[in-house]
Amino acid sequence: MDDDYDEPLESENKDETETALAHQDSDDTLYCEAEATPSVEKEKTTREDSETDLEIEDPEKFFTIGQMELYLEACKLVGVVPTSYFIRNMEESYVNLNHHGLGPKGTKAIAITLVSNTTILKLELEDNCIMEEGVLSLMEMLHENYYLQELNMSNNNLGLEGARIISDFLQENNSSLWKLKLSGNNFKEEAAALLCQALSSNYRIKSLNLSHNQFSDVGGEYLGQMLALNVGLQSLNLSWNHFHFRAAVALCNGLRSNVTLKKLDVSMNGFGNEGALALGDTLKLNSCLVYIDVSRNGITNEGASRISKGLEYNESLQVLKLFLNPMSMEGAVFLILSIKRNPKSKMEELDISNVLVTEQFVRVLDGVCAIHPQLDVIYKGLQGLSSKKTISLCTNPMKLIQNYTDQQKISVLEFFKSLNPTGSMTMSVGDFRKAMVQQNKVPINRYQVRELLKKLDEKKGVVDFSSLA
């Protein structure tokens, strides 16, 4: 589900950086990932305690030996066996050390090496039992390293002290780090307070993952207060926490004044219909959010009706996921009619894929899509419709296009480029869906357009035709 507005880091290694950014994973979001933070000018402070715990025995050697030799020296210093994968990949822009059993000392050896590393832009350290010592080493490293942009420290059970160390670092705003994953770290209310205090003034972190933690309503209130003040975050994942009505209201209150957040994932929580009411009210005012996931939040038809009130006025939202909520076709009708009543709606995807609908619903949806051809509503299926007939609705669309292009003696690529007014090789998903529905050369329905998007391997909300060349 996860959403891109990445900009390369401006540094001496600009070419390497631009190449490296191509390695962004799918979690870089569909529609709204962050812009990479420009390189920060190093400000040499006159701290008395400027000597870091990451120094090796011979400071001169730190700057003169190669990266591999430095790492081997660091491993010897802290007393750990070197990780062969890191040795083989330390000159790459993306390094995945997930599940390597590094422990705090192994992490410290990595951190010592990264102080002078200029190639690694994205580092994965999930599930390594890095503990407080490892986190501290990484944060000290980031005071010196102005190249690392993305860091994953998920599932390391960092707890309150880990949150404290990270928060102290975030308050300083002096690194190039813009994407931070902290999922599954047993963060509770006190950790939420520390992190939110730091994030209220931090403007460099653009993408933050705090899913699978232990935040309850009190933590949600801290996060809501942070969102009202933060001017950096563009993507926030809070799924799989313990939020209920109070947290939902607090988060939505924060979103009313927030002007930067584009993607919010609060799936697998407990907003309920009261939270849906708060979300609907927020959608009337917020003009920045383009992606919201409130899947499995106990929202019934009543809650869907309340969300629909906001959709009637919202002019920015493109994706709304309501999968696994206990609503029926009645709630689905509320939602699609609210989009129909909003001539300025930008909705491209409504996910209600656990709802079984009737042919009457589909006729209503056809009317909505006539007004908003960029819209795709994902539902479970039609009541009483055989699976054979369902499959026939998705007859291979690429084959239909191929037949047309063969008749016209043009390439498939030329056909797709003709759909784009700019003639370029890329289009947004919404624009592509709208163009395919409105073109009259090849008869294709909404379901077939969805299949086309899968075949064209759309990523981050963009369809790229270059693979057809």
Image (cartoon, grey):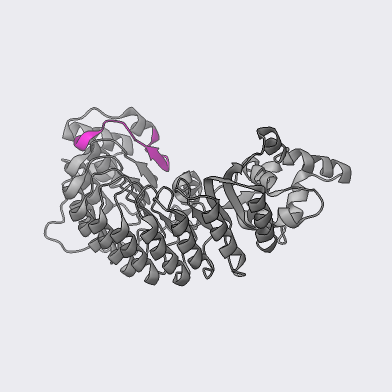
On the rendered structure, is 17 left or right of 45?
right
Residue 22 seen: yes
* Camera-side residue of 389 and 168: 389
Closer to us: 57 or 178: 178
> Which stretch is magenta?
89-105
Quadrant of the rendered structure where residue 152 is? top left
Query: Which residue: 82% across, 44% down?
Result: 405
Q: Is residue 255 above or below residue 50?
A: below
User: Residue 370's x, y, as percent?
Assistant: 70, 60
Q: Is residue 166 left or right of residue 239?
A: left
Q: Residue furthest left?
A: 48
Q: Position of residue 221 (x, y in %)?
A: 26, 62
Q: In this rendering, does residue 174 appear at all?
A: no
Is residue 102 inside the magenta stretch? Answer: yes
Residue 248 shown in magenta: no
Residue 420 appears in which quarter of the rendering? bottom right
Closest to the observer, 465 or 56 = 465
Classify residue 65 as left or right of residue 232: left
Q: Residue 231's spot in the image, x, y percent?
A: 36, 67
Residue placed at 17% from the left, 64% from the top?
Answer: 46
- The image shows residue 465 at horizontal and vertical percentages of 67, 47
Check the picture and name the quadrant holding the C terminus: top right
Count of number-bearing discs: 0
Q: In this rendering, would 48 be left or right of 277? A: left
